Amino acid sequence: MPRRTRDLTMSQQLARGPIDLPFLMLVVMLATIGVIMVFSASFATAVNEERRATYYFERQAIFAVMGLVAMYIISRINYQHFRMMSLLVLGISFLLLLLVLVPGVHTNRTDGVRRWIRSIGPIPSFQPSEVVKLGVVLFFSARMSKRGSEKKRQYDTSVTLGQIAQKLEDWGFMELVPYGVILLAIAVLMYFEPHLSGTILILVPAAAILFVGGVKLRWFAMGGAAAGGLLLLMLQGYQSKRILVWKDPWAYSQDGGYQIIQSLYAIGSGGLFGVGFGQSRQKQLFLPEPENDFIFSIVCEELGLIGAGLILLLFALLILRGYWIALHARDKFGSLLVVGIITLMAVQVFLNISVVTNLLPTTGISLPFFSYGGTALMIQLAEMGIVLSVSRQIPAPKQG
Protein backbone atom coordinates (compact mmCIF):
# COMPACT_ATOMS: atom_id res chain seq x y z
CA MET A 1 0.00 0.00 0.00
CA PRO A 2 1.46 3.43 -0.89
CA ARG A 3 2.62 5.44 2.11
CA ARG A 4 0.32 8.40 1.38
CA THR A 5 -2.72 6.11 1.22
CA ARG A 6 -1.64 4.32 4.39
CA ASP A 7 -1.20 7.66 6.25
CA LEU A 8 -4.59 8.89 5.03
CA THR A 9 -6.25 5.68 6.21
CA MET A 10 -4.59 6.03 9.62
CA SER A 11 -5.74 9.67 9.82
CA GLN A 12 -9.32 8.66 9.10
CA GLN A 13 -9.16 5.89 11.72
CA LEU A 14 -7.84 8.26 14.36
CA ALA A 15 -10.68 10.72 13.71
CA ARG A 16 -13.25 7.97 14.38
CA GLY A 17 -12.04 6.86 17.81
CA PRO A 18 -14.37 6.72 20.85
CA ILE A 19 -15.36 10.08 22.28
CA ASP A 20 -14.64 10.89 25.93
CA LEU A 21 -18.13 10.36 27.34
CA PRO A 22 -17.55 11.86 30.85
CA PHE A 23 -16.25 15.11 29.34
CA LEU A 24 -19.12 15.24 26.83
CA MET A 25 -21.76 14.68 29.50
CA LEU A 26 -20.30 17.36 31.77
CA VAL A 27 -20.32 19.90 28.92
CA VAL A 28 -23.91 19.07 27.98
CA MET A 29 -25.04 19.29 31.62
CA LEU A 30 -23.39 22.67 32.18
CA ALA A 31 -24.68 24.10 28.89
CA THR A 32 -28.22 22.89 29.66
CA ILE A 33 -28.23 24.26 33.20
CA GLY A 34 -26.75 27.51 31.89
CA VAL A 35 -29.55 28.02 29.35
CA ILE A 36 -32.17 27.27 32.01
CA MET A 37 -30.61 29.81 34.37
CA VAL A 38 -30.56 32.43 31.59
CA PHE A 39 -34.34 31.93 31.33
CA SER A 40 -34.80 32.45 35.06
CA ALA A 41 -32.41 35.39 35.34
CA SER A 42 -33.51 37.32 32.25
CA PHE A 43 -37.29 37.39 32.02
CA ALA A 44 -37.69 40.44 34.29
CA THR A 45 -35.14 42.34 32.20
CA ALA A 46 -36.84 41.27 28.98
CA VAL A 47 -40.27 42.41 30.19
CA ASN A 48 -38.82 45.73 31.35
CA GLU A 49 -37.37 46.21 27.86
CA GLU A 50 -40.83 45.51 26.42
CA ARG A 51 -39.73 42.22 24.87
CA ARG A 52 -41.16 38.73 25.23
CA ALA A 53 -40.38 37.27 28.64
CA THR A 54 -38.55 34.43 26.91
CA TYR A 55 -36.58 36.68 24.53
CA TYR A 56 -33.12 36.08 26.01
CA PHE A 57 -33.85 32.43 26.72
CA GLU A 58 -34.91 31.72 23.14
CA ARG A 59 -31.80 33.33 21.66
CA GLN A 60 -29.49 31.59 24.11
CA ALA A 61 -31.19 28.23 23.49
CA ILE A 62 -30.80 28.60 19.72
CA PHE A 63 -27.10 29.39 20.05
CA ALA A 64 -26.68 26.53 22.51
CA VAL A 65 -28.17 24.04 20.05
CA MET A 66 -26.02 25.44 17.23
CA GLY A 67 -22.98 25.30 19.50
CA LEU A 68 -23.63 21.68 20.50
CA VAL A 69 -24.00 20.71 16.82
CA ALA A 70 -20.75 22.54 16.04
CA MET A 71 -19.07 20.81 19.00
CA TYR A 72 -20.07 17.40 17.67
CA ILE A 73 -18.93 18.19 14.12
CA ILE A 74 -15.58 19.54 15.34
CA SER A 75 -15.12 16.50 17.57
CA ARG A 76 -15.29 14.35 14.43
CA ILE A 77 -12.44 16.25 12.77
CA ASN A 78 -8.89 15.02 13.15
CA TYR A 79 -7.40 17.71 15.41
CA GLN A 80 -4.17 17.72 13.39
CA HIS A 81 -6.04 19.89 10.89
CA PHE A 82 -6.19 22.63 13.53
CA ARG A 83 -2.40 22.84 13.38
CA MET A 84 -2.62 24.03 9.77
CA MET A 85 -5.42 26.47 10.61
CA SER A 86 -3.61 28.09 13.55
CA LEU A 87 -1.80 30.82 11.62
CA LEU A 88 -4.98 31.73 9.71
CA VAL A 89 -7.05 32.01 12.90
CA LEU A 90 -4.34 34.14 14.52
CA GLY A 91 -4.26 36.43 11.48
CA ILE A 92 -8.05 36.82 11.58
CA SER A 93 -7.76 37.62 15.29
CA PHE A 94 -5.40 40.53 14.63
CA LEU A 95 -7.65 41.79 11.84
CA LEU A 96 -10.67 41.79 14.16
CA LEU A 97 -8.72 43.62 16.88
CA LEU A 98 -7.86 46.32 14.35
CA LEU A 99 -11.44 46.53 13.05
CA VAL A 100 -12.91 47.05 16.50
CA LEU A 101 -10.93 50.29 16.76
CA VAL A 102 -12.41 51.67 13.53
CA PRO A 103 -15.23 54.22 14.11
CA GLY A 104 -18.54 52.93 12.84
CA VAL A 105 -17.51 49.28 13.16
CA HIS A 106 -17.50 49.00 16.94
CA THR A 107 -20.40 49.67 19.28
CA ASN A 108 -20.16 53.00 21.10
CA ARG A 109 -20.25 53.32 24.88
CA THR A 110 -20.32 56.49 26.93
CA ASP A 111 -17.17 55.46 28.84
CA GLY A 112 -15.15 55.18 25.62
CA VAL A 113 -14.88 51.38 25.69
CA ARG A 114 -14.72 49.75 22.22
CA ARG A 115 -14.83 45.97 22.65
CA TRP A 116 -17.69 44.87 20.42
CA ILE A 117 -18.07 44.71 16.65
CA ARG A 118 -21.54 45.72 15.53
CA SER A 119 -23.96 43.09 14.29
CA ILE A 120 -24.01 42.74 10.51
CA GLY A 121 -27.16 41.21 9.07
CA PRO A 122 -27.65 37.75 10.62
CA ILE A 123 -24.22 37.95 12.33
CA PRO A 124 -24.72 39.13 15.94
CA SER A 125 -22.39 41.56 17.66
CA PHE A 126 -19.39 39.92 19.28
CA GLN A 127 -16.12 40.64 21.05
CA PRO A 128 -13.01 40.00 18.91
CA SER A 129 -11.20 38.97 22.09
CA GLU A 130 -13.24 35.72 22.05
CA VAL A 131 -11.66 34.80 18.72
CA VAL A 132 -8.21 36.02 19.83
CA LYS A 133 -8.21 33.61 22.80
CA LEU A 134 -8.72 30.64 20.50
CA GLY A 135 -6.25 31.97 17.93
CA VAL A 136 -3.47 32.32 20.51
CA VAL A 137 -4.12 28.84 21.94
CA LEU A 138 -4.05 27.24 18.48
CA PHE A 139 -0.91 29.04 17.29
CA PHE A 140 1.07 28.66 20.49
CA SER A 141 0.19 24.97 20.72
CA ALA A 142 1.15 24.33 17.10
CA ARG A 143 4.47 26.15 17.40
CA MET A 144 5.44 24.85 20.84
CA SER A 145 4.74 21.28 19.76
CA LYS A 146 7.69 21.60 17.37
CA ARG A 147 10.02 22.77 20.14
CA GLY A 148 13.17 20.70 20.22
CA SER A 149 12.88 19.62 16.58
CA GLU A 150 14.28 22.90 15.22
CA LYS A 151 18.05 23.29 15.00
CA LYS A 152 19.61 26.04 17.07
CA ARG A 153 21.33 28.77 15.12
CA GLN A 154 25.05 29.27 15.45
CA TYR A 155 26.49 32.77 15.75
CA ASP A 156 29.98 34.11 15.16
CA THR A 157 31.32 34.23 18.70
CA SER A 158 34.50 36.01 17.66
CA VAL A 159 32.75 39.32 18.33
CA THR A 160 31.02 40.46 21.49
CA LEU A 161 27.55 40.73 19.93
CA GLY A 162 27.91 37.23 18.56
CA GLN A 163 28.78 35.91 22.00
CA ILE A 164 25.73 37.62 23.52
CA ALA A 165 23.47 36.31 20.75
CA GLN A 166 24.82 32.79 21.13
CA LYS A 167 24.30 32.92 24.90
CA LEU A 168 20.70 34.06 24.44
CA GLU A 169 20.18 31.27 21.91
CA ASP A 170 21.54 28.71 24.35
CA TRP A 171 19.23 30.03 27.06
CA GLY A 172 16.25 29.65 24.75
CA PHE A 173 15.56 33.39 24.51
CA MET A 174 15.51 33.60 20.72
CA GLU A 175 12.81 30.95 20.36
CA LEU A 176 10.60 32.91 22.76
CA VAL A 177 10.79 36.14 20.76
CA PRO A 178 7.88 35.29 18.38
CA TYR A 179 5.61 34.48 21.34
CA GLY A 180 6.57 37.69 23.12
CA VAL A 181 6.03 39.82 20.01
CA ILE A 182 2.57 38.32 19.42
CA LEU A 183 1.45 38.82 23.03
CA LEU A 184 2.85 42.36 23.11
CA ALA A 185 1.04 43.28 19.89
CA ILE A 186 -2.22 41.87 21.23
CA ALA A 187 -1.79 43.67 24.56
CA VAL A 188 -1.19 46.99 22.78
CA LEU A 189 -4.32 46.59 20.65
CA MET A 190 -6.36 45.57 23.70
CA TYR A 191 -4.99 48.62 25.53
CA PHE A 192 -6.73 50.91 23.05
CA GLU A 193 -10.12 49.24 23.58
CA PRO A 194 -9.33 49.06 26.61
CA HIS A 195 -9.94 45.48 27.76
CA LEU A 196 -7.96 44.51 30.84
CA SER A 197 -9.89 41.33 31.66
CA GLY A 198 -9.66 40.13 28.06
CA THR A 199 -5.90 40.67 28.10
CA ILE A 200 -5.59 38.54 31.25
CA LEU A 201 -7.63 35.75 29.66
CA ILE A 202 -5.24 35.73 26.70
CA LEU A 203 -2.00 35.90 28.68
CA VAL A 204 -2.75 33.16 31.21
CA PRO A 205 -3.52 30.25 28.82
CA ALA A 206 -0.61 31.37 26.64
CA ALA A 207 1.67 31.17 29.69
CA ALA A 208 0.25 27.73 30.55
CA ILE A 209 1.10 26.43 27.08
CA LEU A 210 4.64 27.82 27.30
CA PHE A 211 5.09 26.32 30.77
CA VAL A 212 3.89 22.85 29.75
CA GLY A 213 5.92 23.17 26.57
CA GLY A 214 9.11 23.30 28.65
CA VAL A 215 10.02 27.00 28.84
CA LYS A 216 12.31 27.65 31.81
CA LEU A 217 10.89 29.40 34.88
CA ARG A 218 13.34 32.32 34.68
CA TRP A 219 11.61 33.54 31.53
CA PHE A 220 8.26 33.45 33.32
CA ALA A 221 9.66 35.72 36.02
CA MET A 222 10.78 38.25 33.41
CA GLY A 223 7.64 37.87 31.34
CA GLY A 224 5.45 38.18 34.42
CA ALA A 225 7.13 41.47 35.34
CA ALA A 226 6.60 42.80 31.82
CA ALA A 227 2.97 41.65 31.77
CA GLY A 228 2.38 43.21 35.18
CA GLY A 229 3.70 46.53 33.89
CA LEU A 230 1.38 46.39 30.90
CA LEU A 231 -1.62 45.56 33.07
CA LEU A 232 -0.83 48.47 35.39
CA LEU A 233 -0.81 50.79 32.38
CA MET A 234 -4.28 49.53 31.50
CA LEU A 235 -5.55 50.42 34.99
CA GLN A 236 -6.72 53.86 33.98
CA GLY A 237 -9.89 55.88 34.41
CA TYR A 238 -12.87 53.82 35.45
CA GLN A 239 -10.65 50.74 35.85
CA SER A 240 -8.55 52.29 38.62
CA LYS A 241 -11.75 53.38 40.35
CA ARG A 242 -12.90 49.75 40.40
CA ILE A 243 -10.14 48.97 42.89
CA LEU A 244 -11.51 51.61 45.28
CA VAL A 245 -15.01 50.18 44.83
CA TRP A 246 -13.68 46.66 45.47
CA LYS A 247 -12.09 47.73 48.78
CA ASP A 248 -15.32 49.30 50.06
CA PRO A 249 -18.34 48.98 47.71
CA TRP A 250 -20.69 50.55 50.29
CA ALA A 251 -18.69 53.78 50.13
CA TYR A 252 -19.60 53.97 46.43
CA SER A 253 -23.11 52.55 46.67
CA GLN A 254 -24.47 54.98 44.07
CA ASP A 255 -21.33 55.34 42.01
CA GLY A 256 -19.80 52.04 40.97
CA GLY A 257 -20.49 49.86 43.98
CA TYR A 258 -24.21 49.33 43.41
CA GLN A 259 -23.90 46.19 41.27
CA ILE A 260 -21.53 44.33 43.59
CA ILE A 261 -23.66 45.27 46.62
CA GLN A 262 -26.77 43.83 44.97
CA SER A 263 -24.76 40.75 44.00
CA LEU A 264 -23.74 40.19 47.62
CA TYR A 265 -27.35 40.65 48.74
CA ALA A 266 -28.43 38.00 46.23
CA ILE A 267 -25.79 35.53 47.36
CA GLY A 268 -26.52 36.11 51.05
CA SER A 269 -30.29 35.81 50.69
CA GLY A 270 -29.97 32.40 49.00
CA GLY A 271 -28.97 30.66 52.19
CA LEU A 272 -28.39 26.92 52.14
CA PHE A 273 -31.20 25.79 49.83
CA GLY A 274 -32.08 29.01 47.98
CA VAL A 275 -35.37 30.85 47.55
CA GLY A 276 -36.43 28.53 44.73
CA PHE A 277 -35.97 28.45 40.97
CA GLY A 278 -37.46 31.56 39.35
CA GLN A 279 -38.07 33.23 42.73
CA SER A 280 -35.09 35.59 42.81
CA ARG A 281 -35.87 39.08 44.09
CA GLN A 282 -32.61 40.70 43.00
CA LYS A 283 -33.27 40.01 39.32
CA GLN A 284 -36.39 42.20 39.58
CA LEU A 285 -34.38 45.19 38.30
CA PHE A 286 -32.25 45.45 41.45
CA LEU A 287 -29.14 43.65 40.12
CA PRO A 288 -28.21 45.20 36.75
CA GLU A 289 -28.10 42.75 33.81
CA PRO A 290 -28.44 39.61 35.95
CA GLU A 291 -28.33 37.35 32.88
CA ASN A 292 -24.78 38.39 32.00
CA ASP A 293 -21.61 38.54 34.12
CA PHE A 294 -23.49 38.33 37.45
CA ILE A 295 -25.70 35.36 36.63
CA PHE A 296 -23.95 33.27 39.30
CA SER A 297 -25.40 35.63 41.92
CA ILE A 298 -28.88 34.59 40.76
CA VAL A 299 -27.79 30.95 40.85
CA CYS A 300 -26.77 31.37 44.49
CA GLU A 301 -29.99 33.18 45.39
CA GLU A 302 -32.34 30.69 43.73
CA LEU A 303 -30.48 27.42 44.26
CA GLY A 304 -28.65 28.27 47.48
CA LEU A 305 -25.24 27.17 48.64
CA ILE A 306 -25.93 23.52 47.78
CA GLY A 307 -27.08 24.23 44.22
CA ALA A 308 -24.26 26.66 43.53
CA GLY A 309 -21.78 24.21 45.05
CA LEU A 310 -22.99 21.43 42.76
CA ILE A 311 -22.51 23.65 39.72
CA LEU A 312 -18.98 24.50 40.85
CA LEU A 313 -18.39 20.77 41.33
CA LEU A 314 -19.44 20.15 37.72
CA PHE A 315 -16.98 22.81 36.57
CA ALA A 316 -14.23 21.26 38.71
CA LEU A 317 -14.92 17.79 37.28
CA LEU A 318 -14.89 19.18 33.74
CA ILE A 319 -11.56 20.93 34.32
CA LEU A 320 -9.99 17.84 35.90
CA ARG A 321 -11.26 15.62 33.09
CA GLY A 322 -9.88 18.07 30.57
CA TYR A 323 -6.42 17.91 32.11
CA TRP A 324 -6.71 14.12 32.18
CA ILE A 325 -7.30 14.19 28.43
CA ALA A 326 -4.25 16.47 28.05
CA LEU A 327 -2.09 14.03 30.02
CA HIS A 328 -3.18 11.11 27.85
CA ALA A 329 -3.17 12.89 24.48
CA ARG A 330 -1.48 11.08 21.61
CA ASP A 331 1.07 13.82 20.91
CA LYS A 332 2.45 17.06 22.26
CA PHE A 333 0.28 19.24 20.04
CA GLY A 334 -2.91 17.64 21.34
CA SER A 335 -1.71 17.92 24.92
CA LEU A 336 -0.82 21.62 24.63
CA LEU A 337 -4.06 22.36 22.80
CA VAL A 338 -6.18 20.90 25.59
CA VAL A 339 -4.06 22.55 28.31
CA GLY A 340 -4.61 25.96 26.70
CA ILE A 341 -8.37 25.53 26.26
CA ILE A 342 -9.00 24.06 29.72
CA THR A 343 -6.79 26.64 31.44
CA LEU A 344 -8.69 29.41 29.66
CA MET A 345 -12.00 28.05 30.91
CA ALA A 346 -10.69 27.42 34.43
CA VAL A 347 -9.32 30.96 34.78
CA GLN A 348 -12.55 32.42 33.39
CA VAL A 349 -14.66 30.49 35.91
CA PHE A 350 -12.38 31.47 38.80
CA LEU A 351 -12.32 35.16 37.89
CA ASN A 352 -16.08 35.38 37.35
CA ILE A 353 -16.88 33.72 40.70
CA SER A 354 -14.28 35.92 42.40
CA VAL A 355 -15.87 39.06 40.97
CA VAL A 356 -19.48 38.27 41.94
CA THR A 357 -18.34 37.45 45.49
CA ASN A 358 -16.14 40.60 45.61
CA LEU A 359 -12.99 38.56 46.08
CA LEU A 360 -11.55 40.51 43.11
CA PRO A 361 -12.43 43.91 41.55
CA THR A 362 -15.25 43.93 39.02
CA THR A 363 -14.24 42.99 35.47
CA GLY A 364 -16.16 42.13 32.34
CA ILE A 365 -15.53 38.39 32.54
CA SER A 366 -18.49 36.12 31.80
CA LEU A 367 -19.20 32.69 33.29
CA PRO A 368 -18.69 29.98 30.64
CA PHE A 369 -21.91 28.23 29.48
CA PHE A 370 -24.02 30.46 31.78
CA SER A 371 -23.67 34.15 30.94
CA TYR A 372 -25.90 35.39 28.15
CA GLY A 373 -24.07 35.78 24.84
CA GLY A 374 -24.64 33.60 21.82
CA THR A 375 -21.31 34.08 20.04
CA ALA A 376 -19.28 33.46 23.20
CA LEU A 377 -21.30 30.33 23.96
CA MET A 378 -20.77 28.94 20.46
CA ILE A 379 -17.02 29.57 20.62
CA GLN A 380 -16.82 27.90 24.05
CA LEU A 381 -18.68 24.83 22.78
CA ALA A 382 -16.47 24.76 19.67
CA GLU A 383 -13.43 24.72 21.99
CA MET A 384 -14.96 21.79 23.85
CA GLY A 385 -15.30 20.09 20.46
CA ILE A 386 -11.55 20.47 19.94
CA VAL A 387 -10.92 18.82 23.32
CA LEU A 388 -13.23 15.95 22.35
CA SER A 389 -11.38 15.64 19.02
CA VAL A 390 -8.14 15.17 20.94
CA SER A 391 -9.83 12.61 23.20
CA ARG A 392 -10.76 10.49 20.18
CA GLN A 393 -7.08 9.80 19.52
CA ILE A 394 -6.04 8.77 23.02
CA PRO A 395 -4.24 5.44 22.63
CA ALA A 396 -6.16 2.47 23.96
CA PRO A 397 -4.71 0.95 27.14
CA LYS A 398 -2.55 -2.11 26.63
CA GLN A 399 -4.18 -5.40 27.45
CA GLY A 400 -2.48 -7.36 30.16
Image (tube, helix red, strand yellow):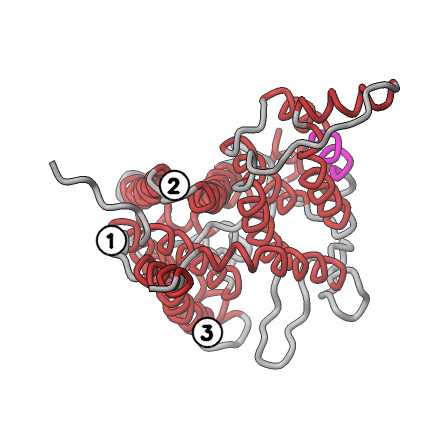
Confirm whether residue 310 shows in the render: yes
Residue 204 in the image: x percent, y percent? 57, 37
Q: What element carries label 3?
A: helix
Which residue does the image show at 74% across and 41% down from the upper left?
181
Which portion, as a residue range, is magenta? 227-235
Q: In the rendered structure, which disc, 3 or 1, sits on the residue that comes first in sequence?
A: 1
Q: Which of 324 and 318 is in front in this view?
A: 324
Query: Is 100 situated left or right of 6 in this image?
Result: right
Which residue does the image show at 73% across and 28% down from the upper left?
154
Q: Amino acid under label 2? A: Ala
Q: How far apart are marks 2 and 1 (CA)?
A: 15 Å
Q: How far apart are marks 2 and 3 (CA)?
A: 38 Å
Confirm whether residue 353 shows in the render: no
Which one is in front in this view, the residue at disc 2 or the one at disc 3? 2
Q: Amino acid under label 3? A: Tyr
- Residue furthest left as drawn: 400
| In the rendered image, the vertical position of residue 156 relative to residue 145, given as above or below | above
Q: Nearer the viewer, residue 205 or 248?
A: 205
Which residue does the image show at 31% across and 45% down from the upper left?
314
Which residue does the image show at 61% across and 33% down from the upper left?
246
What secondary structure prevails in the magenta region?
helix
| Badge number at residue 55 | 3
Reading the image, the residue beneath label 1 is 21
Residue 294 in the image: x percent, y percent? 49, 50
Residue 66 in the image: x percent, y percent? 41, 71
- Residue furthest front as drawn: 1
Q: Is residue 234 magenta?
A: yes
Reading the image, the residue beneath label 2 is 326
Q: Do the residues labelled 2 and 3 touch (CB within 8 Å)?
A: no
Q: Amino acid under label 1? A: Leu
Residue 395 in the image: x percent, y percent? 28, 45
